[in-house]
Image (tube, rainbow, N blue to C red):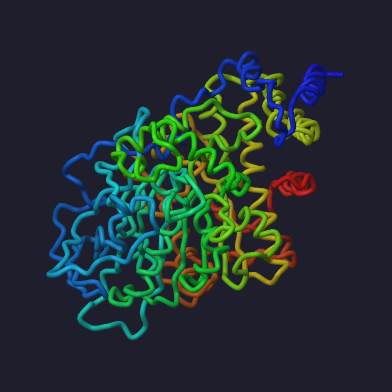
Amino acid sequence: MEIWQCLFLLLLSVTPVENSKNNDFDLASFLRSIYPGMLVKEEPFIPKRDFVGRSEAQPDVKAVSQDSNGASGAVVTTKDGQIKGITVDKARIFYGIPYADPPVGAYRWKPPRPVSPWPGVYDASFPRAACMQACSGPISEECPRKVSEDCLYLNVFVPLDVDFLSPLEVPLPVLVWIHGGDFIAGSASKPLYDGRFISNFTHTVVVSLEYRLGAFGFLVSGKNPLSAAAGNYGILDQQAALLWVQRNIAVFGGDSSKVTIFGESAGAQSVSLHLMIQSSKTLFKQAVLQSLPFSIPLKTRRDALKLGKDFAKQTNCSVSDIVCLLSLSPQEVLAAQMKTSSKIVNPFRFLEVFETWGPYIDGELIKEQAVTAFLKGHWQKEKPVLLGTTSEEGVIFAYGVFNKPVSGLESTVYITAIFKHHALRILHKYLPLYKQTDRRDMLAQIVTDYVFLCPSRRSARSGTASGSNVWMYVFDHVSSDHRVWSGLTFCYDHACHGAELPFLFDSASVANFTLSIPEKLLSNRMLCYWGAFAHVGDPSSRAHQTTFCREQRLPVWPRYSDTSSWLVMNLTVRSHAQVGTRNHICDFWDHLGIY
């Protein structure tokens, strides 16, 4: 018997089951004694692609890649008042439109309230502050320049050929972007998410929205919303923004009956939740889910309350004293959030290292885990869905958590801690495939397969079986100049988590690399697919393609179906439909039944 098998049996003999009340055995300390490179969370884990903003407000907020020669913008009249935007080279832009009243003071941990109408003309020429978040790490220049509790704003991008003085006979589809960032970071106005190119290229109205993050958006201190923080405010914020779109998007040339919501990472999680939430049903028509971490569990009410109790302890408030909690300054809330997130990773809930704060299952708005809802058909199955992953999602997570090489013995410890009695089968499946001394690549592939790819495939097949129209993709391209965008300092030569974003938003220059001509064509083709989906709910439809897209003779993207051998679109320089390359691995995970 190999040493890793002996260790596996030893660990099983001492590892308490997850729900055991007797947790005297300190596995965390045991793991650290074996592997000193284990992440000790002096700060919450944040993928380096999405490091977050400074807690101090910074002056001179700049528009998203705003041209210095932006022309005077048009004035539109919304339900709440007049708004004046700007006109730039690729779109008409309306920055920083309030969609709810500021959630400050006594309204800090309350559902969003309707925005108060304003007199005169609102200046929408620049983005407002991002929601409260902390900034750390080597690439803090990517952080929002200004953060505030007063952050419930959205941006609207409109194609240049829309004439607000002459309403369109056929209004345009609407794409609503929900940003990622682990529910503690990110901003709608991040340069990486500049919506002007998508809007102009696809001939759609693009909306990007801010929502409360971290403890501000997801603190749970009790069950009674009248006397405690009840959580999930960030998701309610998103709903309020979607309702604003329904009420107002027509004056921007948009069609409120043709709204597509799309998001990446935590943004994709948000999209999946709106597909499950009954009260979101009428707010959009279809959805795009990019790199949805299906297997990262939402917290239960009990877990959320425990986190809230730990948070209150850091503030010297009682968890039941909402007056004390409301009296905290935004910086004090943020500091307590960071301290609450700084505990050593619990090996029995290891995946929560990637999402300390976020939505929880409250039994009303959110009733179950997203992967469970998709497998059981408890979602809006009549809505077309486009979903996919990058080919190497897990690299950024494995190398972010493990800051030193991981041996085969050490990887056995971690896999056993995470997967318990399933670990032996997983080790038998993966260990023979990775002979390198450093097993971080193996751990990265397990994260890719278990967290992202395979549960997405399983959910897509469940949806297809129940009559849903689903399209799947894998983004499999590595930049030809081998550079790293948006702070992936250890992610060279990989199609990592978020790697498709500079191509989709045409924001490669923001990430300090230049697209080659074939890569530029890949970017354009992705926009052709996303645009066709927004217009008619089918990425391969030619009905509303631009002349450029028709001339490209794009490879047909078949609907995900067993009648077509479960074909997925491989998005690379030579994009093509293919049978899933890791179907045998996903079959393995499906049979384990542990999503």
**Residue in the image at 20% along x and 55% along y:** 126
Instruction: Locate residue 431 relative to residue 297 in the image: left or right.
Output: right
Across and down, in percent, residue 107 comes to 33, 54
- Classify 448 as above or below 262: above
Q: Nearer the viewer, residue 288 or 59?
A: 59
Residue positioned 12% across, 70% down in the render: 120
Q: Quadrant of residue 471?
A: bottom right
The quarter of the picture where the N terminus appears is top right
Residue 390 image offset from top left, x and y in percent: 55, 46
Residue 539 is situated, as x and y percent measured from the top left of the image, at 53, 67
On screen, residue 593 versus residue 114, left or right, reads: right
Q: Nearer the viewer, residue 297 or 563?
A: 297
Q: Residue at x 30, y 58 (%)?
A: 153
Toward the bottom, the furthest residue is: 169
- Where on the picture, by quarter, is residue 451? top right
Report whether 595 appears left or right of 221. Answer: right
The image shows residue 364, relative to residue 258, as above or below, that is above
Number of marks drawn: 0
* 437 versus 445 height, above or below: above
Residue 100 image-quadrant placement: bottom left
- Residue 301 is situated, as x and y percent measured from the top left of the image, at 57, 48
Residue plotted at (28% across, 44% down): 147
